[in-house]
Image (tube, rainbow, N blue to C red):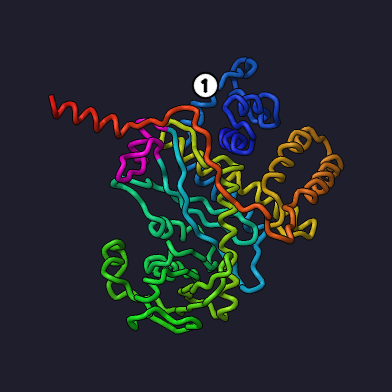
Amino acid sequence: MVIWLIIFQRLHAKGTLAVAVRELLTGPVGAWVHAPEGAPQEEPLSANTSAYSQARSKLPLEAAQQVSQEIFQSLYQKQPTVLPELDRPLFLLDGSTILTAHTPALVQAYPPPRNQHGAAHWPAMRVMVAHDVDSGLATPPCWGPLDGLQAVSEPGLTKEIMGRLPAGCVILGDRNLGVFSVAYHAKQHQHPCLLRLTQARAQKVYGEGMPPASKTDQAIRWSPSREDLRNNPEIPRAASVDGRLLAIKVRDARGKWQKLCFFVACLDLAPAQILKLYGYRWRIETDLRSLKREVRLHMIHAKSPAMVDKKLVLGVAAYNLIRATMSQAAAALHLDARQSSFSLTQDTINAFMPAFANAGSHPERQDLMDQMLRVLAQSTLPRRRKRRSAPRTIWPRPCPFPKRKVAAKRKAAKATKGVA
């Protein structure tokens, strides 16, 4: 019940503790609350949030992770999909950052990032996600501090998340993941991989003192460098990964030519098919936007690291429930699941949820399902034939209050003490 209420908070537009408690009082989840056997007649539930807050704090993180994993596996098994270019699933890997509230415990667990001007105010965590290219379902994430002595990198989190992927699926990563450790651990988990390489790394892997020319499609054996071995002690010195190095010249959105370099392992596809697969990588950017904006994971408001971790794990579970609804509705309506609007689907579920809870018979629920499918058929993204006429620009936000200059004040205080 506590896990469902946390997920309900992620799906609700307001998502406060009070909203979850009132759902417990009036919604179907209230039927799960029973007094122990032999206890006196139970009193009406209170509308205060203290008991629910304490129950969330006592919930083990392992239980939240197990529920999130079970939700992903059950939903993914019901709708396994593959691309026309592949005979197996493809998962997109990418990292992102999430801010947390500023409390002493969170500052210690997730130190704020620093630069030459000092430390930021908000603690930040690095999160690695893996999403199915077709349905958008996400595995439970991996995370760690963004800064500090215990800071983690995207390749380091990728090694951990590979064990949560379906067996034999293909992984696709951008330049931040185009390193030897990712290719090596993909081989250990028997995952074919498609990794984009930077120009400098492609030149080093090519091993001929110059960058690979366009239209290069050459079989190579990738060996670790001294830096790879130093940063990944678990990799043997004699380790290697066999694959192909490809260099393909394409036009970018501005019409300029650029050369893309890829490392491909265990994928016998033509360069044109490899390039088409890489074009699907942008989908994970829209998935991250849905996670941060619609499920409100851009900043997690909690006071303890344990509560932040539980909200992150169950927030991804809430996202998967919406994605599964989109996929099942698209299959019933013979539409593309990626053409459905995540926001409109979430609004539709929130609107029909009370009606489904109050339905007393199967024909009534079936009638509601037909109505819901009709609404979901009209909840698709617009198909724009032309690019937007107005350029996409970022407008500065107005700042009614003066910005805090903590670093300058500290420097001035130190100078004053030095003079004294």
Residue under label 1, please give it: 50
Q: Give the quadrant of the C terminus.
A: top left
Residue 320 % position (x, y): 61, 49
User: Which one is in front, 133 or 72?
Assistant: 133
User: Which one is in front, 362 or 307?
Assistant: 307
User: Which one is in front, 282 or 177?
Assistant: 282
- In the rendered image of this protein, does residue 138 appear above or below residue 19? below
Quadrant assignment, res 14:
top right
Magenta extent: 102-123
Looking at the image, the residue that sits furthest to the front is: 390
- Is residue 103 covered in magenta? yes
- Is residue 5 covered in magenta? no
Answer whether residue 58 is visible to the viewer in this image: no
Quadrant assignment, res 199:
bottom left
Question: Counting other residues with Cα less than 10 Å from the Cα at mark 1, is it few (<14), some (14-19), or many (20 or more)?
Answer: few
Residue 211 % position (x, y): 39, 78
Q: Give the quadrant of the N terminus.
A: top right
Residue 86 % position (x, y): 61, 73
- In the rendered image of this protein, does residue 377 appear above or below residue 197? above
Residue 160 % position (x, y): 42, 57
Q: Callout 1: helix, strand or loop?
A: helix
Residue at 49%, 32% (x, y): give it.
399
Number of numbered discs: 1
Residue at 62%, 27% (x, y): give it.
19
Residue at 44%, 84% (x, y): give it.
219
